[in-house]
Amino acid sequence: MKSIKTKLISLSTSLIACVILGLSTLVLIMASKALENTASNVMNSLAAESSKLIESRIKEQLTILELIASNTTLTDSTVSTTQQLASISAFVEKYQYNKMGIASLEGNITYTDHSSGNISELDFFKNAAAGVSTVSDPYMSDADGIVVVSYAVPIMKNNTVIGVLTSTKNDSEISNLVNDITFGKTGRGFLLNKQGVKIAHYNQELVINMDNDFVNVETDKSLTQVVELEKKMVNGETGSGNYVYNGVKKFMVYCPVNGTTWSLGIAVQRDELLSELTELIQIGCVFAAAFLILSFFIVYFIARNITNRIQLATNYILPMSHGDFSCTISEKHLCMKDEVGQMLQAVHTMQQSVRDMLKSMTVHSGEIDADAQSLSAVAQQMSSSSNVVAASIQEITKGTITQTDSLVLIADSFNEFSNAIEKISDDIKTIDQHTQDIMTLSADSNKNMLDLAGSVQNTNQTFSQFKTGIMRLGENISEIHEITNLINEISDRTNLLSLNAAIEAARAGESGKGFAVVAEEIRKLAEQAKESSIDISALIATIYNENTQMIQATNSVGEEFSNQTSVIHNTVDSFNRIVKAVEEVLPNITTVNIAAEKINVEKQDILRKVEDISAISEETSASTEEISASSEEMASSSENVANSASNLGANTAQMMTEIKKFKL
């Protein structure tokens, strides 16, 4: 069995070890992130400064070339290309160019080494021809077999591009700048162009072979993480990320090189970034072990102190479990203020209480024995009396049962009468409800018929107004007919006047031709007006006939409205008579309903009294049976009490024997 001390030490030490391990892990994680963030910030600053350095070197080369391009020899169209090349040949050696060239806007170029070609399809030429000074991506020179870079600037005259000046230079300057970028022992820089090709790298073979991870990943899936970061680089983004390259975990930062389509990256092995973390882990392990050992000794002393107190309490309590209540404990231990002290105080109080109880039981056991003997004698007398009472009660019970049976028959007969009364009352209520419904429906129907009569009257008045409007319409149509006749007469006269005007124009000869044309147009308009008037007359005649038919129809409808009004009034009178008849019937139904309800109430009262008497009789019968049974039980119980009294005496003697076993 494990002791409490062992459990306390093992559990506490395990808990402290877990806390130390958790805190150490948390510190290591935070330290790792802090180191990584610090390295990331430093590398980002290094990448930004290196990018600016590359940008400044490129700008420096472009500025030199722009100054050369501003020479009047190059801007003067009267100077031959040979003379222009001769004027710039001195700059080739001065600025360590491989060669320089002058290109027309069509892309035809002549170099200082007397070679020529066409560069119209090259991006750096297109940009320069558009007025933007540009540097090309490093590329392998076919002539020299080395990696070179070309610079191109526009040749301007009166703010107009008239040609392009180029210079070709060894890529070693940019490569050296990139190779000089280092971070720690393993951190190195590299450059990618827009297509992801390595144009500057500490491994020069990758530059010569124009290595491209976007192509390599198709055959080597381990480059997936690298490619994801390089995609962000070629998109001109700034950031950082982790990846695995040739089985080595690396951390990389990247940023674009302004003024170019290049992106600069700096990669370092993660183990180097976290190298300082190893020393921190070692120091942490030493401190954790020391703290764990110290915690073990502290827990050991605390556990020993607690278990010593518990052992003291155990030594005090254990004898009591064997019946020895005479043991004692010092006042010093009883005065302890902790939980063990409280437990000792409680056990001490219990010890005193048990000792007092045992002493009291010893004193009162003799008294209990004497009382048990007296109780046995009384119980025997009660048993004899109970038998006599039981016989008398049985006779009473027989008479009560006969009376109860008679009352049950009376109650059943009255229940049948009650059910008949209830059915009559329900039927009367149903008739009353139906009569009320008839009254309500009659009143509603009467109201609806009155509303209908009012509506028909309003409709008749509206229809009369409609009929008057139709009559007025007929009168207006007659007036329109007279107006059309007047229009026809005016048209005839206008036609006659236009004919006379035409005759007079013919007499006037050449000077009257214009008037003749006007007269002809007036005649045509008069004929058109007459034709329109005839059409209107025909339409009016049709409308007049339809209006006449409408007047006849309205007369018929008016008669129908009059007949309908008469029928509605007759219906209203019929509903009034129904309502009056129902009102006369309702008081009689109400009187009958009240009488039926009164009979039902009185019936319920009588039935309740009969049921009460029957219930009382049944209760009396049941009570007598219970009394009889109780008497028999009391007789039996008296015998049991006598036996129990005898047993009590025996048990008291046995209890005294057991009490004597305790040591007080």
Image: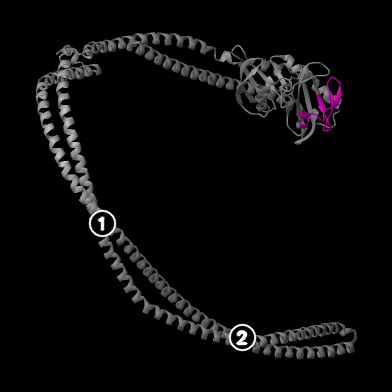
Q: Is residue 305 left or right of residue 88?
A: left
Residue drawn at (70%, 87%), measured in percent from left and top?
545
Q: Is residue 543 left or right of residue 371?
A: right
Picture coordinates of residue 604, whole percent (x, y): 28, 62
Which residues, given as a range, are shown in magenta?
Answer: 101-126
Q: Nearer the viewer, residue 490 or 612?
A: 612
Identify the secondary structure beneath mark 1: helix
Which numbered tag is attached to residue 554? 2
Q: Residues within 10 Å of mark 2 (few under 14, many from 20)?
A: some
Residue drawn at (19%, 18%), measured in percent from left and top?
345
Q: Nearer the viewer, residue 248 or 312?
A: 312
The amino acid type, in three-letter code, at marker 2 is Thr
Q: Nearer the viewer, residue 125 or 493?
A: 493
Q: Which residue corresponds to mark 1?
A: 406
The amino acid type, in three-letter code, at marker 1 is Ser
Q: Coloured how?
A: one colour
